[in-house]
Amino acid sequence: MSERLNIVDHNQLFRQEKYVRQREGKRAFEAPCSPEEVTSTLEYTKTKEYKDKNFARTAVVVNPAKACQPLGAVMAALGFEKTLPFIHGSQGCTAYFRSHLARHFKEPVPAVSTSMTEDAAVFGGMRNLIDGMENCIALYQPQMIAVCTTCMAEVIGDDLSAFLANARQEGALPEDMPVPFANTPSFSGSHITGYDAMLRSVLETLYNKSGRTPQPGHELKLNVLLGFDGYTGNFAEMRRILGLFGVPYTILGDHSSNFDSGATGEYSYYYGGTPLEDVPKAADAAGTLAIQQHSLRKTLGYMKRTWGQQVSSVSTPLGIHATDRLLEEISRLSGREIPEALKQERARILDAMMDSHAYLHGKRVAMAGDPDMLIGLIGFCLELGMEPVHIVCSNGDRKFEKEAELLLKSSPYGAEATVHCGQDLWHMRSLLFEDPVDLAIGSSHLKFAAKEAKIPLLRVGFPIFDRHHMHRYPIIGYQGALNLLTQFVNTVLDVMEEQAPDHSFDLVR
Amino acid sequence: MSSIVDKGKQIVEEILEVYPKKAKKDRSKHFEIADEELVNCGTCSIKSNMKSRPGVMTARGCAFAGSKGVVWGPIKDMVHISHGPIGCGQYSWGTRRNYANGVLGINNFTAMQITSNFQEKDIVFGGDKKLEVICREIKELFPLVKGISVQSECPVGLIGDDIGAVAKKMTEELGIPVIPVRCEGFRGVSQSLGHHIANDAIHDFLMGRRELKECGPYDVSIIGDYNIGGDAWASRILLEEMGLRVIAQWSGDGTINELGIAHKSKLNLIHCHRSMNYMCSTMEQEYGIPWMEYNFFGPTKTVESLRAIAARFDETIQEKCEQVIARYMPQMEAVIRKYRPRLEGKKVMLLIGGLRARHTIGAYEDLGMEIVATGYEFAHKDDYEKTYPDVKEGTILYDDPTAYELEELAQRLNIDLMGAGVKEKYVYHKMGIPFRQMHSWDYSGPYHGFDGFKIFARDMDMTINSPVWSLLPSRQTVEVSV
C-alpha cells in the first residue's frame, strides 16, 4: 500500500500519554471514589462474606444467562420454509430479537412487528395485527406467518385467535395461509420455552390444517428435532450421521439454512427450512428423536399425545457416551445397525481424546448455559477426567437440577460439583473467587467473570457474540467431540505457554 | 425541476408500488429528493417522527432503547435497573460499546445487565415491593454505587406500578438518588421519545444539584456524545488542547456528578442534537447557558467546528485553536493523500439513528466519496432541515425506511458502500455490497475528532476495497445513475 501511516484504534489509542492525562484530569469532575476505596471494595467482593450476601439476595438479577421467550419463538419460526416471524407487541422487542440473533449467527434475521404504541395499549392491537398481515404478505410473500407475542400484548390480554379470525374475515389474511401462534410473554420461561411453544404451534397448525389422521409407523422415516440450537453445524452433522445410517428422516424445525446462507449477490428473505408439507407427513413417521429435552417438552408431549408418536429424547450428544446413546436410539427407532463408518469414527475420536487427555485431566471447570447444553457438557467433561465444579443454569428448573446431579454422581470427577438453578453470572463470579477453577465454559456473557478470575473461557453455547464462525462447526456427535476437544486442549496449551518460563517453553507436546 | 430529481422520484415511486394502498400512501410521505430550490429555502416536506407501519421491517427500536440503551446506560457510576422482564436488559447488554474507565462491577456498571426479572406474579401483584428490595440489594452488592435509575419496560407502565413513589422512598432510605424513568417501549414511535423521557428525568432529579468548586471562563460541557469506541475521548482531547476545560461529559463515560455540575458551563457543546437538544434548551432557559452544535466527523467539519467554538471565546483560545489545527492537519493530509485516491467517486448510502446520517457526510466527502441517499431511523423535522444543506441535488432522503425499501434502493443506485446497523449488515453481505455498521462503528472506532478520522478512513478503505467482494461471480445489480 502506498504510504505507511501509523493508525491506532481504541485498543492502543487511549494508552497514549495524552489520553492517560485526559483520564486523570477528568476525575476532577467525577467526584470519584478514591483508588483505595475501589481496591478495597474489589477485594471485598472476592470474599466469603460477600459471596454469602450475594447468594442471600432474593430480588435483583445481575448478568443472567438467559433471554426471553419470543427470541426462541423467532428461531423456531425460521426453522420452516418461507416462514415470516411476526411479533405482536411494541416494536423495540423485534429490533432486539433481530439484532441478538444477527450478532450470534452473523446473518440477517427477517422478522416483523405490529409496532403497537400507546393507543394500542388502550384499545388493543387488533388493527395493527390486521394491517400488519396485509403489509407483510405484500412485501415479503411468506408461505406461513408465525405469530408470537411480547409482554405488552400479553399484559393487555390481546386475543390472537380472535384477531386472526377477523383478519381472515377482512381478507387481509388469505384463508389458506397457515398462521401458527404462540403466547410468549417475557415474564415467564425463557428463550427455550418460547422456542418450544412456537415449534409446537407450528406442528399443530400445519397438522390440523392437513385434515389427516395420524398413522404412526406408516412411514419408515424418523422425525428429528434439534431444539434451540445455536450451532448451524449441528444440523449438518446430524444429516451426515443419518445419511451414514441410510435412514430417511425429516428435521422438524431446521433453521440452519436461514442462519447460514451464502453470499451470491442477491438477498432472499428465506433460505430453506423444513418444507411445510413435510409436517403433516411427519405424523406417520416410525418415531421421533430429539436431541434436546428441556427446550422441547411441550412439542414432544404434543407429538406423543396427538400423533401417537414413539418419542425418544436424549441430552445434547456431546462426547462419546452421549453420542453412543444417540446412535443406539437411531438404531432402535429405525431398526438399522450402527454403520461401520461411525464405529471407526468413534475409535478415531477416542484415540484423539487419549492423546490429549493428559492436558485436560483434573482441570476444574465452571460452566453456565442452557439446560440441555449443560447436561451434554457435564457428560463430556466427566469423560475427559475434567472436574465440573460450578454449574450455573439461569433457566434451569428442578427437573434439570435432578438430571444434572444424577449425571455428576455417576463419576468420581463429578464429586465436587454444585448445581445452581435460577442463579446468574454474578453468583458465578462469587463462586469463582471463593473456589477457583482452571477453566470456564459458556457463552460470551461469561467472559467478564472469567477475565476477573483470570481463567480462559471456552466459548460453547448461545450467544457467542465475540468470536466468529464457531457455530458453523458441529459440537454434537463424534466429530463434534473432536471439535470441542481441539478447542479445549489447545486453549489449555495456549495458557500453559503463556505462563511458561523460558526453560519450559517446550517445542513438543 | 431537474431530471436528476425526476429520476429519483421515479425510482421511489417504483419501489413503493408493491405496498398495499394504505401503506403506500403513508410511505410515500417519508421520501424526498433533494432539490436545489428546496435546499436553498431550507424547507423539507418529508414526514418524520410518525408511527411505523405494522408488518414491515422497520429498523427502529423503542423508548426503552432510547433511554436505557442510549442516554442513561453509559453513566458509569450508577446502576441502571432494566425494570421488568428479562429480555430488554439482556438484549441491550454491552451492545453499544459505550467505553468507560473504571472497574466493572465496582465503580463502573456500564457493561452489566441488572434486572428485576419480572415473573408472572410480579405482573399480577405489581413489582413495587420487589423494586424496593432490589434497590436495597444493589446498595449492598455494589457499595460504591452513586445512584440508581429505574428504567421501566412495557409491563411496568401497563400494570400501573408507581415506581416514582418507590424511588422517592428509596432515595431517602439509601442516601443515594434513585431515579424513576418511565421509558416503557410502547411509548412514542421510536427511540426518540425515550431520549426525551431520559432527559426529563435528568432534569427533574439531577440537573443543577451539584456544585463545581472553582468555575473558570473556559468551562464547557460535551452534550450528546455516548463515547462509542471512545468517541467522546477523541473529541474532548481537541477541546482541551485548545484550552477549554470540559467539566461534564453527557453521557458517555459520564458520572452522576457531571450530570449535576453541567449547569456551570459557559457553553454547552452538543454533538447528537437529536438525543439531547432538550437538555441544551432547558439549560439555556434555566441557567442562561448558550449552546451550539458541532460536528467532529472528518477534518473539514472538525476544523469548521473547532473555529466556530473558538469564536465563542477570546483570542487565547482562538490562537490555541489554530495551533491545534496546524498540529493535526499534516496528519489529516497524509490520511487523505493515502485514502482519497482509493475512495474517490464511491457512492454511499446511509441509514443511521439520530445525527450521523448528516454528520458523517463531510467525512465521506473529505475522502472524495459521494452520498447518494441518506436518512434516519427516528429523526424529527429539524434533523431533515439540518440535513438539507449538506446534501447534493438528487440525493434521496428517507425517513424510517423499511428493510425492503433500502434493499431495492441500494441495488437500483448501484452503491459502493452501505452504512447502517447490525440488523441490516448481513443482508448487504449477501448482496455483495460493502457495509459498515455505523451505530457502533462495527466494533472499531473512535470515529470522532482527528484521531477518529484516521480510523474512519482506514475502515472505509478496507471495507470498500477488500478483495472479498470481487470473488462474487456476478453481482446482481441494475445500473441506475442518480
Image (cartoon, coloured by chain):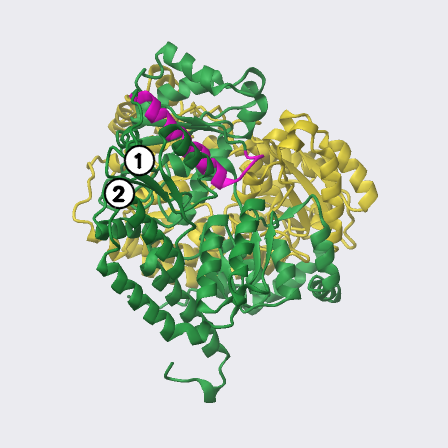
Chain colours: A green, B yellow
**In the rendered image, which quarter is residue A285 located in?**
top left
**In the rendered image, which quarter is residue B119 located in?**
top right
Q: What SS does tag 2 mark?
A: helix
First to last magenta residue range: A186-210
Residue at 55% across, 27% down: A152
Which disc, if any, is residue B407?
1
**Image position of A303 (left or right of B206):** left
Residue at 27% across, 36% down: A268
Residues at circles 2 and 1 in contact by the CB criterion of under 8 Å: yes
**Image position of B399 (left or right of B250):** left
Q: How far apart are marks 2 and 1 (CA)?
A: 9 Å
Q: Mark 1 lies on which chain?
A: B
Residue B409: percent from left, percent from top: 29, 33
Q: Return the residue at label 2.
A: B431
Farthest residue toward the bottom? A503
Q: In which quarter of the image is the C terminus of chain B?
A: top left
Residue type for callout 2:
Met
Assign the magenta stretch its main secondary structure.
helix
Residue at 46% across, 15% down: A162
